[in-house]
Image (cartoon, coloured by chain):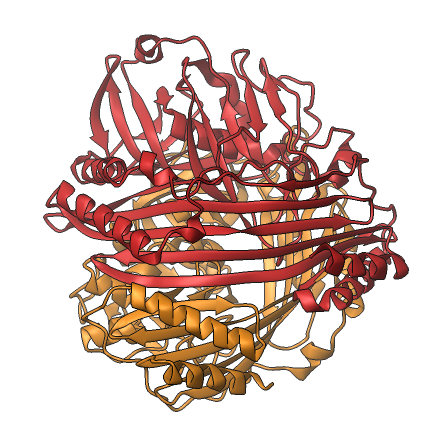
Chain colours: A orange, B red
């Protein structure tokens, strides 16, 4: 059965059985990967994660069910179970209604060539990656993956939509072998909507960074200029700023940015949007997981706070329209109000200019961002790997330095934004340089 | 179930696989969220499916799908293994085991799936109200209850045939405190894979509310900690995460070989007083009888008297390293292949009295509870701290706000001065690409200046 038809069947079953409102979303993700460890390809895999989430509302009380069983009798049984669960739940006086249908954007998210690539073809770039790695570097993981996603959504409020997307990714994680151990782990990945494997684009930066890191440098505690790579910046912002701009955090009094729309909260060189319509972004899709059309939402423009991201529930509670930011977390089985693709506008500094400082640090990645305090904005992380910058050059690796600061304070200390754009897991980011970051060394 | 899986074994062998493994699962999971007085999530998940992992020509193939397509799932895994094997110089070989055949039952007094939604919601409602009433500065409360019950099945062409009943209960709190415009937060996570819903008769709402309420208010009232290296005393919950991050991950054989601990088996890696273990201790979170390769979970002595003595292995890495199988291969669900994972990782007890742990420390920190941690192959570790106090003149002093501590395990383990006499444990989840229930712990540890860097802002 066509999956949108199956969703419609679930909606009809719910309406016939007493649901005030019902929504069904079917999701199928097929991930094919070839992976190498210890210098050789060791595994090829295909993981199919396919199921349906059904949400019902009865008397303003909501419940949901996720099932991997997708035959009609099983879907019908799931509807009965979730209706019973809703009757055990609590009425939410703030509940308004499920979202209405909207106009869906058309985006180039699908490349039929990616559907045709088989594991044998995918293995070749992995062996090419391994062949490019010198003997004094150990590969922890080299991988080539293709992910195909299909979704369909139907609801009693009239939503009926399907979308699909395809992604190709190449990944390398490696360490340099030292006389008395190894370096910190260096990672690089490339994500594309087209089939275009380029092993050197992943291997070369990792090898260059490992070589630079081999020359040990000293670090000193104190305020310093610090350049964040896009990956380290994403890790930091994901656990701090991205949570603070969630409409839920704002309504519940958990965001320091609440009530500051129109105020200057960051350096003028920072413009940040959550752009669910940016086709390069991993989070790009035509609709969110409630069937609301994706959109481009301004968050910060030239340092001024412009707005927040909303889903259907929190948007209606605050009297704002949903910005299409409902994301179903299948691991925790709950709907999260979360970013689609946070995008910082590239600045004017090229890769040489952004390093052009007399003394400072380059942070390639950070440990411990997940322990940050999203409410206060305080964070305390280890910079690993990190480099010393002297007179505009990365002069060697530093081990064991920490950064301890506050994200809302640091946003006002951005003094340079790179002209690059790196596609990361949740964002598209350039390099960013902060002045006066609090560096701690032994 | 096994008769369905047997068709897959036949298909795998006829497709040229030397090893065929089928893992099936039939689990019901419940997730309830309760925030600021409302049920924000009430979800059930019916998790059913099958995973097939095969060795063919010495390489792995993995595929998963629904139970009614077992044969095609196995066929897919075989063709994937053939692709993976094309460029291998050597063949992956598995350590020998004695195949087990057993039905393993849980002894839940109150099986989680038999407890009504109403009762579970009511417990969260009571917990919410107790936390809210703990202090007027508590501004927002997010609670999550999860539980599961089901069966997992393992069948291999070597003769392993295990049906294991599974289940767990878990409670998580994230609480926000607010005073004079300053926001802060603390968390609490507890659960059991050994007990059913009866777990909450011991771990009552009152106990949880007092613990997390106290933590968040200490965050509100705490001073900013200093930055730099100081002598410190770590409590059992922090010691456990230190064990997990500082050496636990690098003792997972798939990580050891690319780490700073490679080649250090049999060598001194810690002070003489240090002993560290990973073991499926009965009653701890994540402990089961068998791992997902059908190997009985075994104790591993990672460090004995300061010497690096053991690795956590699966069958592939046991053969590769020559170490014993430890029963450490686990998969989050049928959607994942197995990985080497810790179970209960802990430092062993010592002989320090409570007074000896603190005496002579003019200024330092006493770290009681953590919020997350991470590890790097070069042994760089980080542990987020959400409950800590100053130590002044050998006495516990004022609380401090949250921070991180970090260090290099290759250096820090030598600077452990001594361990207390009593062990304590905590439960949590490890995210090495997949989520796994783990626990960790130990005694109080006293650690010299120079081992640990405090990332404070004071």
In the picture, residue B248 is in which quadrant? Answer: top right
Q: Position of residue B196 (x, y in %)?
A: 43, 42
Question: Residue B229 at what x, y percent from top left?
Answer: 37, 25
Is residue B435 visible in the rendered image? The answer is: yes
Number of numbered discs: 0
Which residue lies at the image location 32% right of the left edge and 60% below the top edge?
A243
- Point out the image quarter for the C terminus of chain A: top left
- The part of the image, by quadrant, that contains residue B312 is top right
Residue closest to the eye, B356 or B437: B437
Vertical placement of A183 versus A26: above or below?
Answer: above
Quarter-wise, where is residue B199 in the image? top left
User: Where B38 falls versus B441 (above or below)?
Assistant: below
The residue shown at (70%, 37%) is B295
Identify the residue at horizontal 38%, vertical 90% (top origin): A158
* Rendered residue at 66%/53% (across/down): B337
Asked if B434 appears above or below B274 in the picture, the reply is below
Horizontal side of A186 relative to B138 (left or right) equals right
Q: Is residue A307 or residue B289 the one in the foreground?
A: B289
Q: Is residue A68 found left or right of B423 in the rendered image? A: right
Q: Nearer the viewer, residue B147 or A47?
A: B147
Q: Position of residue A414 (x, y in %)?
A: 33, 58
Horizontal arrangement in the rendering, residue B99 relative to residue B272 (left or right)? right
Quadrant location of the N terminus of chain A in the rendered image: bottom right
Q: Please, is residue A394 above or below residue B199 in the view?
A: below
Return the x and y of residue B446 as percentages of the image width and height.
Answer: 40, 17
Quick check: B452 left or right of A183? left
């Amino acid at each position: 059965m066509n999956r949108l038809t199956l969703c419609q069947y679930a909606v009809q079953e719910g309406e016939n059985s007493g649901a005030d409102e019902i929504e069904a979303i079917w999701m199928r993700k097929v991930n094919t990967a070839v992976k190498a460890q210890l210098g050789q390809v060791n595994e090829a895999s295909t993981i199919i994660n396919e199921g349906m989430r059904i949400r019902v509302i009865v008397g303003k009380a909501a419940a949901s069910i996720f099932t991997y069983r997708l035959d009609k009798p099983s879907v019908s049984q799931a509807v009965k179970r979730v209706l019973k669960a809703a009757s055990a739940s609590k009425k939410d006086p703030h509940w308004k209604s499920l979202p209405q249908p909207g106009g869906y954007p058309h985006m180039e998210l699908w490349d039929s060539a990616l559907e045709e690539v088989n594991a044998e073809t995918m293995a070749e770039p992995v062996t090419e990656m391994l062949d490019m790695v010198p003997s004094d570097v150990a590969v922890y993981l080299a991988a080539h993956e293709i992910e195909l996603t299909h979704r369909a959504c139907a609801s009693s409020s009239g939503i009926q939509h399907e979308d699909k997307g395809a992604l190709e990714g190449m990944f390398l994680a490696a360490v340099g072998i030292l006389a008395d151990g190894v370096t910190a782990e260096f990672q690089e990945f490339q994500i594309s909507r087209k089939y275009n494997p380029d092993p050197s684009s992943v291997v070369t930066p990792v090898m260059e960074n490992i070589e630079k890191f081999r020359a040990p440098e000293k670090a000193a505690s104190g305020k310093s200029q610090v350049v964040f790579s896009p990956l380290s910046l994403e890790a930091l912002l994901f656990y701090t700023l991205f949570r603070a701009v969630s409409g839920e955090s704002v309504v519940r009094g958990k965001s320091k940015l609440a009530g500051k729309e129109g105020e200057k909260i960051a350096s003028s060189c920072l413009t940040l949007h959550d752009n669910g319509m940016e086709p390069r972004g991993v989070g790009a899709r035509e609709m969110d997981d409630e069937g609301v059309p994706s959109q481009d939402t301004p968050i910060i423009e030239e340092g001024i706070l412009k707005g927040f991201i909303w889903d259907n529930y929190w948007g209606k509670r605050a009297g704002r329209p949903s910005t299409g930011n409902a994301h179903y977390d299948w691991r925790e089985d709950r709907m999260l109000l979360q970013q689609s693709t946070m995008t910082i506008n590239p600045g004017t500094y090229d890769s040489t200019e952004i390093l052009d400082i007399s003394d400072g640090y380059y942070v390639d990645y950070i440990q411990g961002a997940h322990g940050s305090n999203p409410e206060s904005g305080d964070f305390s992380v280890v910079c690993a790997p990190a480099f010393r910058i002297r007179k505009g050059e990365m002069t060697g690796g530093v081990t064991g330095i920490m950064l301890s600061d506050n994200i809302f304070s640091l946003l006002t200390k951005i003094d340079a934004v790179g002209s690059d754009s790196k596609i990361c897991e949740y964002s598209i980011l350039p390099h960013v340089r902060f002045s006066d970051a609090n560096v701690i060394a032994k | 179930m096994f008769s369905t899986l047997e068709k897959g074994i036949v298909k795998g062998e006829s497709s040229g696989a030397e090893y065929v493994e089928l893992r099936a699962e039939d689990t019901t999971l419940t997730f309830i969220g309760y925030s600021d007085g409302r049920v924000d999530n009430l979800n059930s998940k019916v998790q059913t499916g099958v995973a097939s992992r095969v060795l063919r020509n010495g390489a792995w193939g993995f595929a998963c799908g629904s139970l009614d397509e077992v044969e095609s799932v196995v066929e897919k895994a075989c063709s994937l293994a053939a692709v993976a094997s094309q460029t291998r110089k050597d063949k992956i070989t598995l350590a020998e085991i004695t195949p087990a055949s057993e039905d393993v039952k849980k002894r839940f007094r109150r099986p989680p799936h038999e407890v009504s939604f109403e009762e579970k919601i009511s417990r969260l409602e009571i917990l919410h109200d107790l936390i809210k009433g703990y202090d007027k500065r508590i501004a927002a409360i997010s609670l999550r209850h999860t539980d599961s019950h089901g069966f997992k099945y393992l069948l291999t062409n070597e003769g392993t045939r295990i049906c294991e009943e599974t289940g767990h209960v878990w409670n998580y709190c994230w609480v926000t405190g607010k005073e004079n415009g300053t926001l802060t937060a603390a968390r609490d996570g507890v659960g059991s894979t050994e007990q059913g819903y009866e777990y909450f008769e011991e771990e009552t709402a009152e106990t949880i509310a007092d613990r997390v309420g106290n933590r968040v208010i200490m965050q509100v009232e705490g001073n900013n900690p200093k930055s730099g290296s100081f002598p410190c005393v770590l409590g059992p919950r922090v010691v456990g995460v230190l064990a997990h991050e500082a050496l636990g991950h690098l003792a997972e054989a798939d990580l050891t070989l690319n780490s700073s601990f490679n080649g250090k088996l049999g060598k001194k890696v810690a002070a003489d007083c240090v002993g560290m273990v990973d073991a499926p201790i009965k009653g701890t979170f994540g402990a089961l009888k068998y791992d997902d390769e059908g190997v009985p979970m075994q104790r591993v002595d990672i460090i004995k008297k300061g010497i690096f003595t053991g690795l956590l292995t699966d069958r592939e890495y046991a053969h590769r390293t020559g170490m014993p199988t430890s029963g450490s291969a686990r998969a989050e669900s049928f959607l994942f292949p197995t990985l080497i994972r810790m179970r209960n990782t802990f430092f062993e007890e010592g002989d320090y009295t409570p007074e000896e742990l603190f005496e002579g420390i003019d200024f330092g920190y006493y770290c009681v509870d953590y919020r997350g941690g991470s590890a790097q192959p070069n042994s760089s570790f980080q542990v987020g701290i959400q409950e800590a106090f100053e130590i002044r003149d050998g006495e516990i002093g004022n609380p401090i706000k949250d921070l991180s501590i970090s260090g290099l395990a290759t250096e820090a383990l030598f600077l452990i001065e001594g361990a207390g006499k009593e062990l304590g444990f905590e439960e949590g989840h490890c995210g090495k690409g997949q989520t796994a229930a783990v626990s960790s712990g130990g005694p109080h540890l006293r650690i010299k200046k120079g081992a640990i860097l405090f990332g404070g802002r004071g």
